[in-house]
Image (cartoon, rainbow, N blue to C red):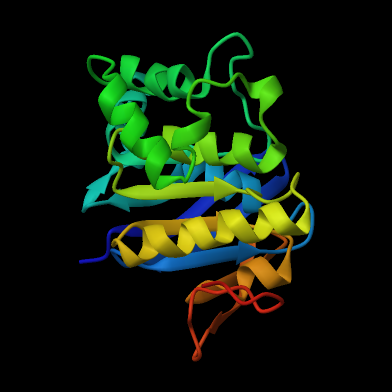
Amino acid sequence: MSLLELKNVSKIYGSLHALDHVNIKVEKGEWLAIMGPSGSGKSTMMNIIGALDKATEGEILLDGVDIAKKSASALTDIRRDKIGLIFQQFHLVSYLTAVENVMLAQYYHSVPDEKEALEALDRAGLSERAHHYPSQLSGGEQQRVCVARALINYPEIILADEPTGNLDEANEEIVVELFRKLHEDGTTLIVVTHNPEVAEVAQRTIVLRNGKVDHETINENFTGKIKHITLQ
């Protein structure tokens, strides 16, 4: 059974079909990239998979459970327990340190635990910056705090919406390398990106156009490494 499956999923706003009978399967431990031009339905799909929005039609099966029919309250629980979200905008609280921003995510799940938050930051390569405020961190470091925050509750799936969109090339490489390590650890990754170099790192790429799956490609030479650099 697939970890995630979308069956004939549509999102309709009046006469606009933002998603139009989309069918996708994502296996446990897979690294999937989603691409497409602006307005193709990428963000709509991400919001629906991430339980931030509800589909108009269709089924969204997560671990075999259809979350499309769940209440707003149940969707909140699903986001908290099963899904780690990473956005292009960092959404860090300016007056909290890196470790406190990570602990904030724990607050909605369990009792905040600084040791666990520090361990998550260490996985993101930020243990030495744990007590710095967002204004004292580079864009790449702030995004890695967001990755640590997404990891803290041990989600089944990480959804990243344009995670390198605000980063320069050097920090893009660092974040992609972090994703590679997470994938090696068995994390399921779905990454929405406009950047073909980031998409080519994934095992599989789905391209959306006009709310439909236009085509998909398999990376036969998958290494989890971005082409324009050599990661050690």
Count the numbered circles shown.
0
> Front-most of 141 and 162?
141
> Front-most of 55 and 202?
202
* Residue 66 in view of the camera: yes
- Where residue 120 appears, as percent x and y from the top left, is 36, 37
- Where residue 165 appears, as percent x and y from the top left, is 73, 49
The residue under the point 30% across, 42% down is 155
Which quarter of the figure has residue 79? top left
- Where residue 62 appears, as percent x and y from the top left, is 29, 50
* Residue 51 in view of the camera: no
| Left or right, residue 22 beside residue 174 | left
Which quarter of the figure has residue 73? top left
Establish if 15 lies above or below 220: above
The residue under the point 52% across, 35% down is 146
Establish if 175 lies above or below 110: below
Establish if 224 lies above or below 106: below
> Front-most of 86 and 19?
86
Q: Give the farthest residue toward the top.
A: 95
Q: Give the farthest residue toward the bottom.
A: 220
Q: Which image quadrant: the N terminus?
A: bottom left
- Where residue 19 appears, as percent x and y from the top left, is 61, 53
Which quarter of the figure has residue 87? top right
Establish if 50 lies above or below 206: above
